[in-house]
Image: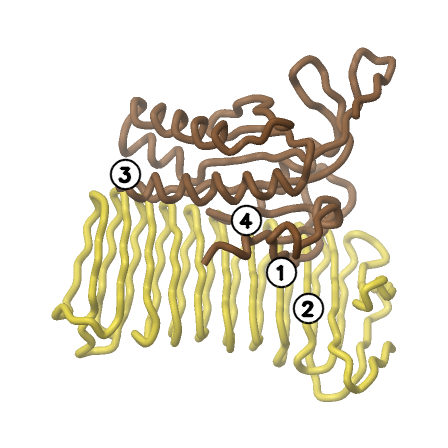
Chain colours: A yellow, B brown
Amino acid sequence: MVTPPADARVRLRITTVSGRVTVSAESGGEVGVGASGSVSETPDGDVEIRPRKPSDSVEVTCPSGADVIIGTRSGSVELHGVLGSVGITTVSGAIKVGAVAEADLRTVSGSLQLGECLGQCRVSTKSGRITVGTTRDAEISTVSGRVSIGNVTGRVDVRAVSGRVSIGSAARGPVRVSMVSGAVTIRLPRGVRPSVQAKGLGVVQTVFEPGDDVAINVATVSGRVRLVAD
Amino acid sequence: MAATTGRGADEVEGTIVFTDIVGFTEFTATRGDAQALELLATQDRLVRGALPDAARIVKELGDGLLLWFGSPVAALQSAFAVDRAFEAESEAAGAPLWLRIGMHHGSVLARGDDLIGHHVNVAARIVDVAAPGEVLVSDALRRCVDPASAGVRFEELGPVVMKGIPDPVRLWRAEDVFCP
């Protein structure tokens, strides 16, 4: 067990190749690692956790609000409880995250699920499927994957090559969509009057009367953007 | 500073940069080969315009470039400038496309005009992780740069496991603090 000082911010740095990573955030002040993981402290005070064998799974407990950085190649990642700033990079592993303060999640082909993000949520995939429940701000990029975000209360920035993106926006922050040939659906509250600026040869369909409640900027080569009522 | 290895190659230390146009394949399929060539010419022009004296284009790699810089700070500043200019030009032309850029610092072997070695391979893997419009750098490069004087903000991505690279590489997202 590693017990951080009461006023210290805990940051975990976890790396596996193919082993599964499970992190459970709980009330209390201790970092605990299962028998298959080795623990060391980095010069900058982070807790570094690695599996004893490359294919070993790692199970970790930590205080609620801890920051976590994880890198895997094909190992799946599950984060339970409420965490601080979370960064996960994987090639093909599946990612499931509960609730976080901030997130930077990227996968090449693995699937990714995030329940709730209180701050900025940055997600990136090449061909994986990404599902986010609610977040304040969303920065999304996909090459050919599918991205679905239930509710964004702040700003939205989408960069898509040919994927499919579906986002629910509370229309309290600007929405910017740049895409080559994909399909993006933005759900807005009924009765909102967006200011839509569109560039390019793609198609923008909207059911809303124009106004200045929220700025929607769309640039697309040949993609399709739909603004629909939530 | 170059040191001859005795194997007919000079060992040089510097910053290796890979660029890649995101969406190039889809753009070519939609707009045709002629416009795709124009896009490559745009990338080439913007990169050449941003290169300082102690830097060069090593080679073209399809829709990407391999660049070499003597200074990591100059490499970062050039990357930011090219990234911004490319996005602005492509969007103004009605084709929202982005560069993604991966950077690493280390010693490599110069074989003629080409560069080879482990650190070149690491840089090539880093660009694969970058999102559209993003500049990612290795920890080796970050440690060579004073963020305050270089006008750079680094945000950690963490250890990344890359194909063919034995150890995880600690990556950072680099942002220009002067860019809004």
Determine whether label 2 and label 1 are within 8 Å by CB. Answer: yes
How many residues crowd mark 2 within 10 Å: few (<14), some (14–19), many (20+)?
many
In the picture of the structure, the residue carrying the numbered disc 1 is: A88
Give the amino acid type for the residue marked by disc 1 in the picture: Ile
Foreground residue among A172 and A39: A172
**Residue B175 at x, y = what percent?**
56, 53
Chain of the residue under label 3: B
Chain of the residue under label 1: A
Rendered-image quadrant of the N terminus of chain A: bottom right
Q: CA distance from mark 2 to mark 3?
A: 41 Å
Give the amino acid type for the residue marked by disc 2 in the picture: Val
Give the amino acid type for the residue marked by disc 4 in the picture: Val
Residue in the image at 16% along x and 71% along y? A211
Chain of the residue under label 4: A
Residue in the image at 62% along x and 59% along y? B155
Chain of the residue under label 2: A
In the picture of the structure, the residue carrying the numbered disc 3 is: B93
Question: Helix or strand or loop: what does disc 3 sit on?
Answer: loop
Judge if badges 1 and 4 mark residues of a common chain: yes
Determine whether label 4 and label 2 are within 8 Å by CB. Answer: no
Q: CA distance from mark 2 to mark 1?
A: 8 Å
**Residue A24 at x, y = what percent?**
69, 77
Q: CA distance from mark 1 to mark 4?
A: 12 Å
Residue in the image at 76% along x and 65% along y? A58
Q: CA distance from mark 1 to mark 3?
A: 35 Å
**Residue B58 at x, y = what percent?**
60, 22
